[in-house]
Amino acid sequence: MRHLLLATALGLTGLTFAANSQAASPGPSTGRPVKEDSLFQHRSQFVINFGIQNGGDELIPLLDADTGEQVDNSRAGGFTRLTIGGDIALGDSDFSVEVTGGMLYDGLTSNLNESKSKFERKVLELIPFWNWDRHRFGIGATAHLEPSWSFKPDSQPSISTEYKDAVGAILQYDIRYDQNISVGARYTYIVYEEDVDVVTEEVDGQSFGVHVTYAF
């Protein structure tokens, strides 16, 4: 189900890319893209980002209580991200720096029994971007603070795991629909370490996802 949701979002993002590329086709006389430059001004703005992503190590499978078959799973890279902050234009250059903070949350409840899985962390992100026309490309850093995973099996006591704060890398591309709305895709690389003193166990939290940004 989650793979279908992410694939659908990726497909819609691809259609937006194609539509915007067609809208910026070369003009018949100058050979340059035809678009209203005022719609794509490069300036400092507040931003709200919402995205879905998935990937990384499997934390727990959710099983059919009757057959034992896996119906879904929770992964360390998922699933919904909400951040707010600002994109700061660096003078008259083509570069900007986006600074945001928010939450990354993955919650699953089996509809076949009462098993529940939850993985949540606070995120801080700093991404320098190169901006051109309606596009931007950035490579930056993300900090995941207080990562915590819990699992409540059906009719059994819950278990939980705390992870150390982690820092990872982000590769991101966005394309503007207009001055306020853009869509994009990102790859995140990050590794979580279990917060214990004796044995260090690592969990791969890398992910790929798509997102929508509203700037104002």
Image (spheres, rainbow, N blue to C red):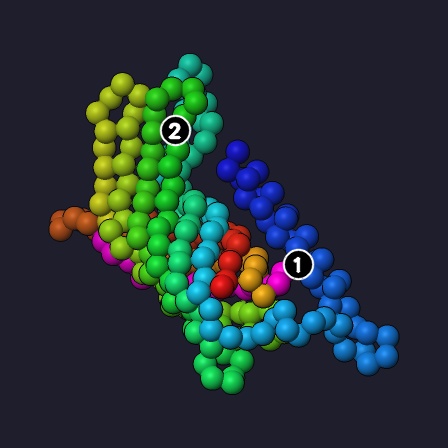
Query: Mark 2 = which residue?
Result: 109
What's the residue at 86%, 79% (across, down)? 29
Q: Which of the two discs, 1 and 2, labels the residue nearer the N terminus?
A: 1
Question: Which quarter of the picture shows residue 124?
Answer: bottom left
Graded by Cα atoms within 10 Å as few (under 14), some (14 to 19) or many (20 or more), the crowding at tag 1 reads some
Q: Quick check: can you spot residue 26? A: yes
Residue placed furthest toward the right:
28
Label pair 1/2, CB-CB below 8 angstroms: no
Report whether 117 appears left or right of 146. right
Amino acid at pointer 2: Thr
Above or below, comparing residue 194 to residue 4 in the picture: below
Marking on residue 167: none
Q: Extreme top residue here?
A: 66
Label 1 sits on a secondary structure element that is helix
- Which residue sits at x=44%, y=16%? 67
Res. 17 mark: 1
Residue 110: image quadrant is: top left
Q: Is residue 143 left or right of residue 140?
A: left
Residue density around tag 2, few if under 14, some if 14–19, many if 20 or more, within 10 Å: some
| Image location of residue 126, percent across then percent down | 38, 68
Question: Is residue 206 or residue 113 the one in the foreground?
Answer: 113
Element marked by disc 2? strand
Whole-percent x and y of residue 6? 54, 44
Is any atom of residue 194 visible in this view? no
Quadrant assignment, res 182: bottom right
Does the segment drawn in magenta span residue 56? Answer: no
